[in-house]
Image (cartoon, coloured by chain):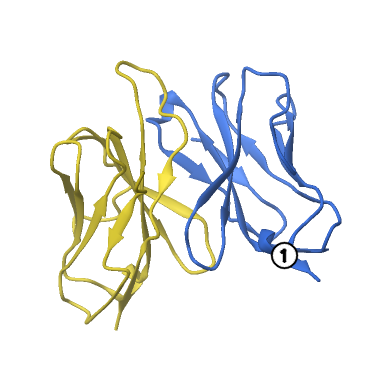
Chain colours: A blue, B yellow
Amino acid sequence: AQTVTQSQPEMSVQEAETVTLSCTYDTSENNYYLFWYKQPPSRQMILVIRQEAYKQQNATENRFSVNFQKAAKSFSLKISDSQLGDTAMYFCAFGSATSGSRLTFGEGTQLTVNP
Amino acid sequence: GAGVSQSPSNKVTEKGKDVELRCDPISGHTALYWYRQRLGQGLEFLIYFQGNSAPDKSGLPSDRFSAERTGESVSTLTIQRTQQEDSAVYLCASSHRTSGSRFSYEQYFGPGTRLTVT
């Protein structure tokens, strides 16, 4: 079974600075997908970024980018130019066809952006 | 277009009562998922529907939990004889999935139903 670990329960950053959230996972599969979801206090889960394991290039979405290290099974999220609206719980998630399309989530990292 | 919707937004029930939680997926999304999120924790997978069949029910925690789906539309999660440990936010997600073994791409989530069992 796959596992996803987020070792930072809480993090804080000053507005306009850069922060990196860590995620590691364990799997014996070669083809899979990784995601970062954001959950603000409204409870709405919002997809931030996704990475296909077969792609070597790290995914980027505006201020959000990932550092995908397949051999190390590491998938960190970098948020540049942090904004107050980035304050939320961030979840790392793993999915693959052999796991029946379910997503396995980490425990989450609460990010607070301070003015 | 409209996103995933869930009702009710909040539900308070007495221990031992049955509850029904509803999910309306995004139109055209063939795959539907239910997750449970306990306070301060990540999401636990409960059940997955492809169309109206459930190929993966492995996450349902007990036989008090059941779910059904009408065609490629509404799904209902039913919890019978609720217990206090059932208190959580129940999240529904949907995704577009092609036929065969192609992996469902990203999942789109509803706002969840917060269930409190007193």
Residue drawn at the location 82% of the way across and 52% of the way down: A81
Considering only vertical position in the picture, is A14 above or below A67? below
Quarter of the C terminus of chain B within the rendering: bottom left
- Residue B14 image offset from top left, x and y in percent: 22, 82
Quarter of the N terminus of chain B within the rendering: top left
Q: Residue at the front extreme?
A: B1
Residue drawn at the location 82% of the way across and 63% of the way down: A15
Task: Say whether residue B83 is left or right of residue A57.
Answer: left
* Chain letter of the residue beneath label 1 in the structure image: A
Considering only vertical position in the picture, is A98 above or below A75? above
Considering only vertical position in the picture, is B58 above or below B22? above
Task: Say whether residue A36 is left or right of residue B65.
Answer: right
Amino acid marked by disc 1: Leu
The residue where tag 1 is placed is A84
| Residue B116 occupies quadrant | bottom left
- Quick one: B81 or B42, which is closer to the camera? B42
- Residue A38 image offset from top left, x and y in percent: 58, 53
Residue drawn at the location 26% of the way across and 73% of the way down: B83
Task: Say whether residue A100 is left or right of residue A19.
Answer: left
Q: Secondary structure at mark 1?
A: helix
* Residue count near mark 1 (Cα–Cα under 10 Å), binned few <14, some 14–19, many ≥20: some
Considering only vertical position in the picture, is B113 above or below B33? below
- Residue A19 image offset from top left, x and y in percent: 81, 52
- Quick one: A18 or B40, which is closer to the camera? A18
- Quick one: A58 or A92, which is closer to the camera? A58
- Residue A37 image offset from top left, x and y in percent: 57, 48
Task: Say whether residue B60 is left or right of residue A78.
Answer: left
